[in-house]
Image (cartoon, grey):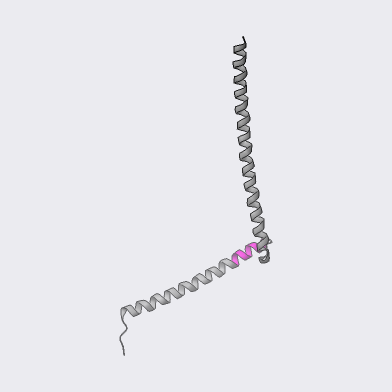
Amino acid sequence: MSEVRNEDIRAIVAATLAEQQQLRREEIDAVVLRAIATILTSFGIEEEDRRELRADFQHLRRWRRSVEQAQSYTFKAVITVIVAGVVGAVWLGIKVMLGK
């Protein structure tokens, strides 16, 4: 009978552990997919609605970005009006002082 070397034993153990780990990953993936499907179904979103759901999220993202951009423009407009008012008041003050 041939003698089993330590390297052979290590290779067999490593292969067995890798196979078990792969099986665990597949089981975990299956459980996660079932959990996500269950959660989405509980919210009334069926698996067939993926395209619509994706389109809804894309629309929400575009809407959020446009609102953020509008807020930015509004802030810039308010700052511009305030600065223009201060500059106008200073200009009128200088004009009045020079007019006397």
Q: Residue furthest top?
A: 100
The answer to which quarter of the image holds residue 86 is top right
Tell me if residue 17 comes above or below residue 36 in the rendering: below
Residue 39 image position (x, y, % from top left)? 63, 62
Tell me if residue 78 comes above or below residue 45 in the rendering: above
Numbered-mark total? 0
Residue 80 image position (x, y, % from top left)? 61, 31
Residue 67 image position (x, y, % from top left)? 64, 44
At horizontal 52% and vertical 71% (from top left) the residue drawn is 26
Residue 52 image position (x, y, % from top left)? 68, 60
Tell me if residue 87 comes above or below residue 17 in the rendering: above
Question: Between residues 13 and 53, which one lies in front from this camera angle?
Answer: 53
Asked whether residue 65 is drawn in magenta, I would say no
Residue 28 is left or right of residue 6, and the answer is: right
At horizontal 66% and vertical 53% (from top left) the residue drawn is 59
At horizontal 68% and vertical 66% (from top left) the residue drawn is 48
Q: Quadrant of the C terminus?
A: top right
Q: What span is colored magenta in the figure?
A: 34-42
Asked whether residue 37 is drawn in magenta, I would say yes
Residue 3 is left or right of residue 70, and the answer is: left
Q: Quadrant of the N terminus?
A: bottom left
At horizontal 34% and vertical 80% (from top left) the residue drawn is 8
- Magenta part, dominant SS: helix
